[in-house]
Structure formats: structure tokens, C-alpha cells
Image (spheres, rainbow, N blue to C red):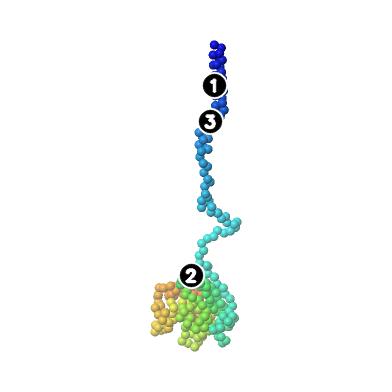
Amino acid sequence: MARSKFTTRTRAALAMTVGCLAVASCGTAISQPTSAQSTSAARPTSPAPEPTAATTTPTTTPEPGTATPTPTGPPKFSAKISPVIRQLLKYSWRPGCPVQLSDLRLITMTYWGFDDKPHTGELVVYKGVADDIVSIFRRLYDWRWPINKMELVDVYKGDDFDSIEANNTSAFNCRAATGSSSWSQHAYGRAIDINPRENPYVSSNGSVAHSNARRFAKRPVQAPGVINPGDRVVKAFQAKGWEWGGYWSGIKDYQHFSKGGG
């Protein structure tokens, strides 16, 4: 009986020892991660997102006091009045002309072209009318009233016919009036011819000397650069005391404005 109890106790002790050994050897199984820990460990870490174009575009901060850029338009009218030198007028002026070089002024100013763009041109006029011309041509520019070109007649070696043939707007030229032996107002720097193709000199019989101007021989004509009776160009000159050749009786000089007549 005692031996049976001893055997039973021995077996129980052995069983307990084996169980403990099993627990010791399987300790990692007991400390398995929870389901949340397991999911976190199994899910790979996502790489950081690549920067988008929006995040990589630098933002420019204006410097303090810097004006915000605005769309640019055509430049404003500008004009400069300066003395002339002999070399500038080597064809259009000579000794014996009714005005001295010292009494002439070069006007360098902007004008609106037939190409719908601003340009810079030159006119020579008598010093006493320079301000008139600047004021009038400022208005023409603001109206975007077109002028074909504006060069000194010296570009054409002082030849009035060639300057007109090129549809050139010009002023001073020491020459006689057309069909006369008397000085033209151009010789005094008190006259200007504007767009001579669109505004031709028309003889009393209706003829014109330049073939490129024949279709503009009668008034009114509705076309760019044309001067018609009573229009705003005529009124702008009249406001400064200038006369228009389009109002002459017999012949008509539609290109011609002068201060003092003739």
C-alpha cells in the first residue's frame, strides 16, 4: 500500500516536472503578440509620398516695396524739341533761305503708324510753332490716327516730289510754293504736309501729280489717314491757328497745314 502511494506521488512529481519543462521550452508561444501587434508587425511601412509638382514649385515673394507687375500697353506719346545743326539739313537749308538755322527746331516724337504700332519720327519746324506741333500730334497719337512715316525731307535730298511719292510727312524745306516763285511757308518752317498719298495736292482741273494718290483726289473719303473737311484733325490744327489747304478755292492741298496761310 505504501509502495503504491509512493509510486503515485512519484508519477505526479514527474508529470509536474515535465509540464514545467514544457512551459519553459515553449515560453515564446506564451508571449505571442496580440492580434493588433501582429497586424502592425506584418504590415510593411509605406514609403513617404513623392512630392507633387504643386509642392515642389517655389513661391516667389515680392521684395518689400516692389510694385506688382501689370500688363504693358503702347508707350505714351513723347516729344523732344532740340536745336538743329547744319549737317542735319545739308539739303533742305542753304544760305539765303528766309529763316536762319538758329530759328529752326528738330522735333523727335512718337506717332501711330498704319501698322497699328507706335514709331518715332522727326520734323523740323520754326521755333515759334514747335509747341503747336507737339500739342497737335499728341492728340493724333492719343486718337491712334495713323501716319505712314515721318522723316526729314533731307532723307530724300531735299526733293519734295520724292518725299511725297514715299508718302512721307514732312515740314521744313527751303523751297518755293508750288507753281510760284515766292517762298512756300515750308521755307519758313511754318507748314507741314501729312500723309500726302491719302491727302494729295489736286490741281484746279482735278489732276494729281502722283499716281498712287489718284483714288484719294476727291473728298470726302473714308479711309485711314485721310483728312476730310471739318474732321477732328482739321479742328485740332484750327484750334492752334493753322489753316488747311483743303479749304482753298480752285486747287486743293489736302495734305497741307500752315500757320499764316500759303
- The answer to whether residue 126 is seen in the rendering is yes
> Where residue 28 sits in the image (x, y, percent)?
55, 31
Tell me which amino acid carries mark 2: Lys
Q: Which residue is mark 3?
A: 29
Q: Quadrant of residue 89?
A: bottom right
Mark 3, secondary structure of its residue: helix
At x 54%, y 84%, the residue is 91
Mark 2, secondary structure of its residue: loop
Q: Which residue is mark 2?
A: 117
Is the residue marked by circle 2 packed among few (<14), some (14-19), or many (20+) residues within 10 Å?
few
Are discs 1 and 2 less than 8 Å apart at CB? no
> Where residue 19 sits in the image (x, y, percent)?
54, 24
* Gap in angstroms between the C-alphas marked 2 and 3: 90 Å
At x 54%, y 70%, the residue is 78
Whether 170 is drawn above or below 75: the answer is: below
At x 51%, y 85%, the residue is 175
Are discs 2 and 3 less than 8 Å apart at CB? no
Q: Quick one: quadrant of the N terminus?
A: top right
Q: Which residue is mark 1?
A: 15
Tell me which amino acid carries mark 3: Ala
**First in sequence: mark 3 vs mark 1:** 1
Tell me which amino acid carries mark 1: Ala
Q: Is residue 257 left or right of residue 80?
A: left
**What is the residue that sits farthest to the bottom in this orientation?**
181
* Gap in angstroms between the C-alphas marked 1 and 2: 110 Å
In front of the other: 1 or 81: 1
Mark 1, secondary structure of its residue: helix
In front of the other: label 2 or label 3?
Answer: 3
**First in sequence: mark 1 vs mark 2:** 1
